[in-house]
Amino acid sequence: MTSTTIPLPHLIGFTERNGNWHAEDLSLADLAKEFGTPLYVYSKRALTEAYQAYDRACVDASGKRRARIHFAMKANSNLAIIDCFKQLGAGFDLVSGGELSRALAIGADPSSLVFAGVGKSADEIAQALKAGVKCINVESIAELHKINQVATRLQCRAPISLRVNPDVDAQTHPYISTGLKDNKFGIAYHEVLKTYREAALLSQIDIVGIDCHIGSQITTTAPYLDAVDKVLDLVAQLKKEGIEIHHLDLGGGLGISYGEESPPDITEFTNTLLNRVAERGFGHLDIVLEPGRSLVGNAGVLLTHVEYLKPGAEKNFCIVDAAMTELMRPALYEAYHAIVPVQSKPVKSVTYDVVGPVCESGDWLGRGRSLAVEEGDLLAILSAGAYGFVMASNYNTRPKPAEIMVDGKNVYLIRQRETVADLFANESTLPKQTHSPLG
Ligand SMILES: Cc1ncc(COP(=O)(O)O)c(C=O)c1O
Ligand SMILES: N[C@@H](CCCC[NH3+])C(=O)O
């Protein structure tokens, strides 16, 4: 049993059969035996089906493409994952020079890359311009000028969109809401027109689009429609002023079910957005969507072994070999992830806090979970495919876990487990004999 009240998320690619959990055709218990724990396991079928659900809505009845999917690789940037999306036809949304390097490493077409982020350095801007990205999403007037300077130095053009902060409440966790006026993201709504006028005067800047991303784990369509309307009002005004917008980037943010949530179905959500753009007379624009979590969140689980069961007067603890270092979401956002025993057993269910070995009281993965487990058993933490491994850390000198991808009956090691030696390979102690500068 997982929890008394919260249902399991609906999963593709991960199923329980006769009391044993599987990733596609392979048993999770066998995978843990072969690759060890903690271990991230992804299902290729799950991420493929999620992509195809978006893609279905992006092509109209006559076969004409209405929008393009740019996977937000911040959600999961493993090369094998991003390469799968590239092969399915995706472009990418990037937030750093590092992510740009990953995209180039898998041979992504630079014209399928958009580069966002509030604090791009001059080096990152230069890297993006040299690579020839489709567009840089500009998040402040200061950044606009820096891009113009870098492009002047490189003697190239800089294709840009302004990221609009539409002041719309995405009704999500405050840490992952990005479209409110007191968030650091984007250009304040009332300053956008002025900033476009300024951009139009800069020597190296090519205005190509407009962008907006209101937050993450959003479970209703209404805030998106508000944001779309506000952005399209700006596009209409810009057109009147002779500033043509060619592409419209609506960001990502569609939520997934971790158990209780019931976000809109991907195809229905995409249709609703694209229909609204078309109804407003802007269907001819090159439309970009940047989903992250909804493509990979439910395509991954984290496997962990139970090290100890520690009964207590107030609480019982189930101490496992994964921690906030492998999955930070519970510690950071008090996020809920379903936790299931990988092999069910006829032992009594007990309510536990599932915690890791890290020296922090905030190091927990699940609270108040009813689990029928013994020491040595294997647990699967579900819905861990997005913002899981990518947010892992080496705190307490813990090597990062391995990642594997299952495709039917096949399994691929897509990231080796780090070793402790890897963690201090770039460090050095001070020379044994030190000399004081005073002699
Ligand atoms: C600019 C941008 N685009 C896309 C995304 C993807 O968001 P999500 O994973 O919620 O779909 C993010 C993350 O919030 C983002 O910052
Ligand atoms: N890291 C967040 C999502 C952040 C989205 C990026 N702006 C999460 O785990 O839910």
Image (tube, rainbow, N blue to C red):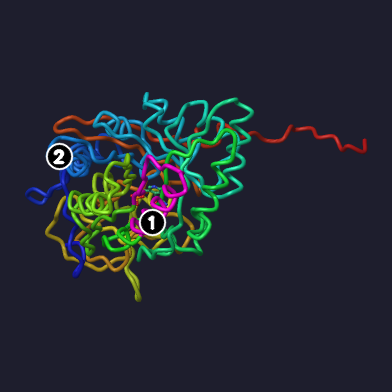
The image position of residue 420, as x and y in percent, is 48, 37
Q: Amino acid at mark 2?
A: Glu
Quarter of the rendering occupied by the N terminus: bottom left
Which stretch appears magenta? 227-252
Q: Quarter-wise, where is residue 430 in the image?
A: top right
- Name the quarter where the C terminus is drawn: top right
- Real-space CA distance between mark 1 and mark 2, rounded to the nearest whole angstrom: 46 Å
Which residue appears farthest toward the bottom when viewing the image? 313
Q: Quadrant of residue 247?
A: top left
The percent coordinates of residue 288 (x first, y second) are 33, 42
Q: Residue furthest left?
A: 18
Q: Where residue 291 sits in the image (x, y, percent)? A: 31, 46
Q: Is residue 161 magenta?
A: no
Total tally of numbered discs in the picture: 2
Residue 405, image x, y percentages: 25, 35
Horizontal relation, residue 139 to residue 76: left or right: right
Dot 1: element: helix
Question: In the rendered structure, does residue 248 fall within the stretch colored magenta?
Answer: yes
Q: Residues within 10 Å of mark 1 (few under 14, many from 20)?
A: few
- The residue where tag 2 is placed is 24
* Residue highlighted by disc 1: 233
Q: Is residue 47 above or below residue 365?
A: above
Residue at the image position 22 percent from the left and 66 percent from the top = 370
Disc ID at residue 20: none
In this rendering, position of residue 118 left or right of residue 3? right
Which amino acid type is marked by label 1?
Asp
Near-viewer residue (317 or 159): 159
